[in-house]
Image: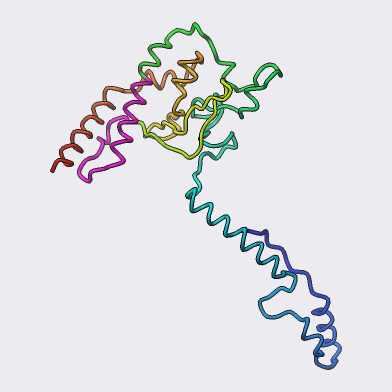
Amino acid sequence: LLVSPRPFAHHPLETRMAERTLQGSAAPSDMDLKFAFKPGFDSRFTFGTVLTCSSLLAVVVASAAVLGPPVLLSSEPLGSAADVGAWRGSGTCEGYWPDVSECLRPGSGAAAQGCPQHYVDAAWDGKDEFLRKVGAMEKTAHKLGELSMSPSGDCHLATEAPSIKLMRYRGLSWSRIEDGAIVGSAEFEDARGRQVACWPDGYSEHYVGEHNLVPSDRFLKYVRDFDLSAFQKAVEELELCSSKHAGQ
């Protein structure tokens, strides 16, 4: 339990005792000593205050033990739970939006700027092809994630192969286009870093597949240029190596 530090005010008795000393008066009386500060103790903190603070600290420690350590989701204040990255067009991650209350406004008209409703086009060309490839990329990333759960010391993914990491987070991401729908709690990230590409699990299926959202040109190009066959081959080789070592 952290409290912003601030200097302690002088106790009236402390001031009075100091004045006596400066004036060359006699030593403090028994009554002065009775109410004076004791070393290392501030008389303004009562037993009840200390007990209350101790109880709050116990609750915080117990909660941390149950929930585990905090997880850094984003340096941007853009929602909660699995929401990481930035709004479409203002960052490198694809598929992150303003808060649910800004995108789903019952009876109040259009969604706020930056919400997925503004990028819907049921007739956009390339949807099926995009979904097939990004779906295969995500499936392979899931398999790589499963293999990483039981790593073998002698088996490693080829360093030169393109790859996508599956990052899991605590909490859930609520849909910004369908009231009450849960999209997921994970994120895909290019192994070269978030500056290359990242997008939430459920983005392609929920937003693109179910609600006809058109991805940004930047993300369309990333998916189009990604070497899927090399990624799949590298994961297959890793899986084969892991299977051999598991059987030994």
**Which quadrant is the N terminus positioned in?**
bottom right
Provide residue 42's location: percent of width, then percent of height: 71, 73
Q: Which residue is drawn at 61% across and 27% down?
A: 100
Residue 129 placed where, x, y %? 38, 12
Q: In this view, does 77 lie above or below 203?
A: below
- Residue at 59%, 34% (x, y): give it: 78
* Image position of 147 (left or right of 41): left
Task: Identify which residue is drawn at 82% across, 86% down.
Answer: 31
Residue 173 is left or right of residue 226, and the answer is: right
Which residue is more in the foreground, 211 or 95? 211
Q: Classify residue 246 as left or right of residue 123.
A: left
Percent of width and height locating residue 55: 62, 61
- Residue 144, by quadrant, is top left
Q: Which of 157 and 246 is in front in this view?
A: 246
**63 to 95, vertically: above or below:** below
- Give the residues in magenta: 134-163
